Image (cartoon, grey):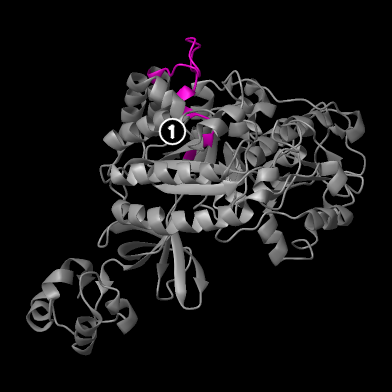
Amino acid sequence: MKALIIDGYVDEPACLGVPPYLSPYARYIAGALRERGLSENEIHYLTIDTLRENPPGVGGLIGKVDLLVIIAGMTVPGKYLRASPITPGEIETIFRAVNGIKVIGGPIRLGFSSEGGRAAKGMESGISLEEATLAKMDLEAFIYDLFEGGAGENSISGGSGSFSARLKAPESVDHRFRTTAEIGRWGPKGAFLIRQHPDYPYCMCELETYRGCGRHVHCSFCTEPFYGASDYRPVEDVVSEVSALYSHGARYFRIGRQPDLFSYHGTDAGGPVPKPVPEILEKLYRGIRNSAPELSVLHMDNANPITLAAYPEESEQILKTIIKYHTSGDVAAFGMETADPKVVAANSLKATSEEVFEAIKLVNRFGAVRGANGLPEILPGINFVHGLMGETKKTFQLNYDFLQQVVDSGLLLRRINIRQVMAFPGTPMYGRDEAARKHKKLFLDYKDKVRKNFDLPLLRRVVPEGTVLNDVMCEVHDRGITFGRQLGSYPLLVGVPALIPLRKFTDITVTGHGMRSITGIPYPLHINTASPTLIRELPSIGRKTADSIAAGIPYNDREDFLRRANEGEKIISFIEI
């Protein structure tokens, strides 16, 4: 039997599965198939970008599979360096090419939208399923239940492999959520799938600790409540999955599939959110480090600012644990959404601007120190959502004033994410997003103002000129520039004015700043072979000095360079002879 998983990518409030990230969903599905008796060789995985590069279907594989599974769904808008999520038209084209059973699922079950500011359409009304089945709850559970029994049962009709179970008619399968016990088994069993990822071994494994929202009321636009109340995975299960991934060559991990890592296994203490249990986070991080002793990246995502503001002592302990075990360059993303108290109230949002400010200060107090990879240990990021109920022109000014307060206080932010709401059916926001259209021009002008007046100065604080960033992965060539990023949470985009081999790591000296990206040169710069363009990028010297240095090439050694190069002492630490 042949099963093919096509990864159309997912991006949710609490999960990322866009290259170089591999979401848990694909691994869970592979594990469910393994548990039903398929061998690793019978389970195939392709990203939609790989399929685009091979339009006939990668050697005709699509037409030969007995079971096709598409994972898809973007419930938050995003922009990606070298990946593009699957489109409705591509889904329909793939379905038409498949003779076997076809199933699609993931966050796309909630609907789809092309961008922020546009309401999502229902999946079944927007895409022709072509006899395919939409998994209306968990895709991995549906795939598991699609089989009658496991190995040793009657052989599949028309099967092309050694599998001996029988596929049911998809319409006979009930839609349900999977259990934490099931993914506790499927996660490790599906770990082998990372070897089929096009970025392997440089793919980030998104790890799930829990899903579902622990609040009693929910943000008006968020899709996480559709998963129900918080459903915590046992620490041992997460660690076991990391161990399995590590054994298959995984070295890059992000604990990102949860709405608030600080609330993992939190307790109800009568507050607005669960009370953190620092001992659990210590057990989790220590277990991951012990099971993956030579990991390259361990980052997190998603922290509820009200948790840090309401429980500062527990949150301080957790921050210290994270810094003890993680790798530097980490980001705690805060879903602030707005600084307007009226919008907070109208949309049941998480925290006031005062509470978010306290959370920012707390993370800065411990995380702003520079770490081994050149970035601060851990910094907060802030997400703003516009177009929410109750938004007025004053909302934009309040958000701007809040950012001014952060900058004036000397605090650091790693990122400021500004987007318009994407309203999904079933959320209180659905059908009430007229402010997104009404304020579109105001939103774009305000966004540009924030980029110029806040992103740029904050970026200069986070990575000043002359900072050395280690292990930047070169990913894209474009008009003589190599673009790359460090692997991790919300990596900074680096542009190098030279063509550097792709899929290779290089250290970079920061030489300039854009609004959301930086310019850099290889570190150390081999001065005798460097182009004049790269030499002109060296920090602390002007173009005239740089051209004089270039004209003096070659240099025999450091002493020769310092003797002959004007202002050579300013750049000697950034070059190699």
Please tell me whether residue 256 is drawn above or below residue 204 in the rendered image: above
Q: Amino acid at mark 1?
A: Ser
- Residue 422: % across, % down: 67, 44
Residue at 22%, 89% (x, y): give it.
551
Q: Quadrant of residue 403?
A: top left
Q: Is residue 251 visible?
A: no
The 10 Å Cα crowd at callout 1, few under 14, some 14 to 19, many 20 or more, is many
In the shown orientation, is residue 332 left or right of residue 8?
left
Q: Which image quadrant: the C terminus?
A: bottom left
- Residue 274: % across, % down: 49, 17
Residue at 66%, 44% (x, y): give it.
435
The residue beneath circle 1 is 353
Q: Main secondary structure of the magenta part?
A: loop
In the shown orientation, is residue 383 left or right of residue 511?
right
In the shown orientation, is residue 149 left or right of residue 496?
right
Please tell me whether residue 137 belongs to the stretch shown in magenta.
Answer: no
Q: Quadrant of residue 533?
A: bottom left
Give 442 or 215, whichever is nearer the viewer.
442
Residue at 72%, 48% (x, y): give it.
113
Please tell me whether residue 265 belongs to the stretch shown in magenta.
Answer: yes
Q: Which image quadrant: the N terminus?
A: top right
**Residue extending furthest toward the bottom:** 551
Label 1 secondary element: helix
In the shown orientation, is residue 253 left or right of residue 123?
left
Q: Which residues are magenta?
A: 254-278
- Residue 540: % across, % down: 20, 70
Q: Is residue 1 visible?
A: yes
Residue at 44%, 52% (x, y): give it.
491
- Residue 7: % across, % down: 69, 49
